[in-house]
Image (tube, rainbow, N blue to C red):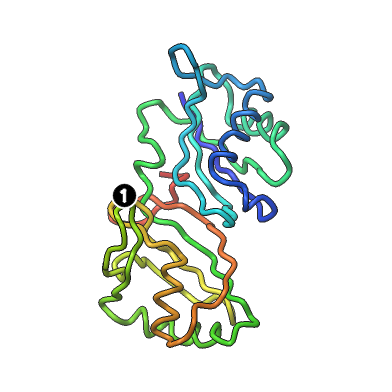
Amino acid sequence: MKMWLIMEKGARIRFIGHLDLMRTMQRALRRSGLPVRYSNGFNPHMLLNAAAPLSLGMPGLREVIEVPVGGDIAPEAFQERLNEALPPDLRCRAVRALPDEHPAPMAMLRAAQYLIELDGDDPGAAVCMSALPGMLAVDVLPAVRKTKTGEKPCDVRPMIYSAEILGPRTICATLALCEAGTLKPDLFLTVLARRAGVEKPGAFITRMQLYAMQDGALTRLEEA
């Protein structure tokens, strides 16, 4: 059996990197005394599997981490004992028990939803907000993505599942996040600012939700 942990990484610890975050999770799981399974060999370690690392400086409200377990424990008890061992700004919001045969969260991940709050003091923010409907109306959005092998031109329009205005300076965008193609919110803003003809405004970005694809539609990863 394995547990999918739905974790919240708060704004106050957003500058803790992914590796440090995973080490924090390992220490908390050890302190909790939960029946976590370890790898075999001379140096056994916890087999934690995160759906997608968060960018440094970005909070995440519904992050998915997979933890194999070796005993029989109810998800509610697992959540309670883990939260007792976690720091205040790192919380387990839900736990789902799954069979070992269930695909890993990283393998199912297809997209993520972001809340993008533009800097209200930046004069380019209002111009970018006005340019969003026009950007979504076009069929092609050329951009340059940074990859492990260098910069590559691409069309990012198919990677934008949705983007809507929630307030005078707030955008909610659902963007591709998978091996086949990822559109980071920073590049989304770069493309939007270029179309608006302004410098990219500052923004505070929160990852709200992760998604899988089921029957041709996006489904919340934690429920897939």
Numbered-mark total: 1
Q: In the picture shown, does residue 176 fall above or below 139?
A: above
The residue where tag 1 is placed is 179
Residue at image x 66%, y 31%? 82
- Identify the image quadrant of residue 142: bottom left
Q: Secondary structure at mark 1?
A: loop
Residue at position x 50%, y 43% in the image: 64
- Residue at 33%, 56% (x, y): give it: 147
Q: Quadrant of residue 167?
A: bottom right
Residue at image point 43% right, 47% down: 221
Amino acid type, label 1: Glu
In the depicted view, which residue is nearer to us: 215 or 131? 131
Position of the C terminus by quadrant? top left
Place residue 174 in its image quadrant: bottom left
- Where residue 203 appears, as percent x and y from the top left, is 57, 71
Q: Residue furthest top?
A: 42
Q: Residues within 10 Å of mark 1 (few under 14, many from 20)?
A: few
Task: State the residue in front, 206 or 42.
Answer: 42
